[in-house]
Image (spheres, helix red, strand yellow):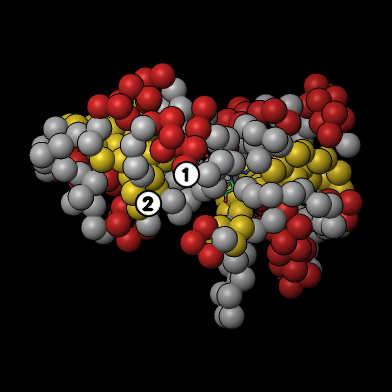
Amino acid sequence: MTLYIIGIGLNDEKDITLKGLEAVKKCSKLFLESYTSKLQCDISNLEELYGKKIILADREMVEKNSDEIISETEDTALLIIGDPMSATTHIDIMMRAKEKKVSVVVINNASVLTAVGITGLQLYKFGKTTSIPFPQEGFEPETPYDVIKSNGELHTLVLLDLRPDEDKFMTVNEGLKYLLSIEDKRKEKVISEDTLAVGCARLGGTYKIKYGKVKELVDEDFGGAPHCIIIPGKLHFSEEEALEMYN
Ligand SMILES: C[S@@+](CC[C@H](N)C(=O)[O-])C[C@H]1O[C@@H](n2cnc3c(N)ncnc32)[C@H](O)[C@@H]1O
């Protein structure tokens, strides 16, 4: 039996690859990992194209109760928004399947990690990616700030927290405010209102990208989720030129 781990891309039902679609057609059960990103279409659009029902798989199901997904009796597919091995990797479930002697086929697709190339920033010049969690009482990690600092001349991709089950997605505005609040606490200059930043929303679909100073982006309306932020490092002139498209 085979477990297909299939990236379904960033936007809508049409972003699945032909290889992915062929695999979906072979499977008796389809699971959609529903907690690490957001598609720009309804699940019913996927079901219509696939001609099959989709079972939503939350974190608990994928990370702990994966027996139904890793089946020894039927071919199943785990659908992942974006690419299955980018940003959040699904290597764990692949290893669990191997332990159960279930063969695994991974079908790649576009990821937010590569879609940011549309800004004109060179992917080779990105440093470590970081993410901003929703603020909680007593838990305000400064990691994103430290990553931007240590990336130095390299660009930093900042992913933003999301809780799809509560329809809660962090916006560019909230993310920038979070970074400014850490700056206030630290009293050091890594991010300030004059730092240049790029706000991105819905890459791969009806995207909106805006480049400017933090103070110019902090109140900008980016529309629907998902959003991310890039803090550029040292810009090559060709990168600067490309970013002008998004002023
Ligand atoms: C865990 S990552 C997504 C991983 C996914 N497997 C992939 O390959 O793209 C989820 C975060 O990436 C960002 N993100 C994902 N898709 C995006 C998109 N299309 N446009 C902008 N940001 C996006 C958001 O910050 C979101 O909270």
The residue sitting at 47% across, 44% down in the picture is: 43
Q: Quadrant of ligand 1?
A: top right
Residue 84 x/y as whole percent: 41, 37
| 108 relative position to 200: left or right | left
Residue 238 visible, this orientation = yes
Q: Are marks 2 and 1 in contact (CB under 8 Å)?
A: yes
Identify the residue under disc 1.
Answer: 43
Which element is circle 1 on? helix
How far across and down, in percent of the image, does residue 176 sit? Answer: 75, 57
Separation (CA) of disc 2 from disc 1? 9 Å
At x 71%, y 42%, the residue is 200
Q: Residue tagged by mark 2?
A: 56
Nearest to the observer: residue 194 or residue 234: 194
Front residue (pair 204, 200): 204
At 26% from the left and 59% from the top, the residue drawn is 64
Q: Residue 138's x, y, as percent?
A: 57, 80
The kind of residue on which mark 1 rests is: Ile
* 236 versus 153 height, above or below: above
Assess disc 2: are there few (<14), some (14-19) or many (≥20) residues with their C-alpha within 10 Å of its C-alpha.
some
Which x, y percent locates residue 92? Answer: 29, 46
Which label belongs to residue 209? none
Residue at figure coordinates x 87%, y 48% from the top left:
213
Q: Secondary structure at mark 2?
A: strand
* Direction from residue 228 to residue 138 in the image, left or right: left
Which one is in front, 221 or 42? 42
Q: Residues within 10 Å of mark 1 (few under 14, many from 20)?
A: some
The answer to whether the beta carbon of the residue marked 1 is less than 8 Å from any atom of ligand 1 is: no
Query: Would residue 85 be seen by someone viewing this image from the given angle?
Result: no
Tell me the quarter of the image containing the N terminus.
top left
In this view, 22 is above or below 43:
above
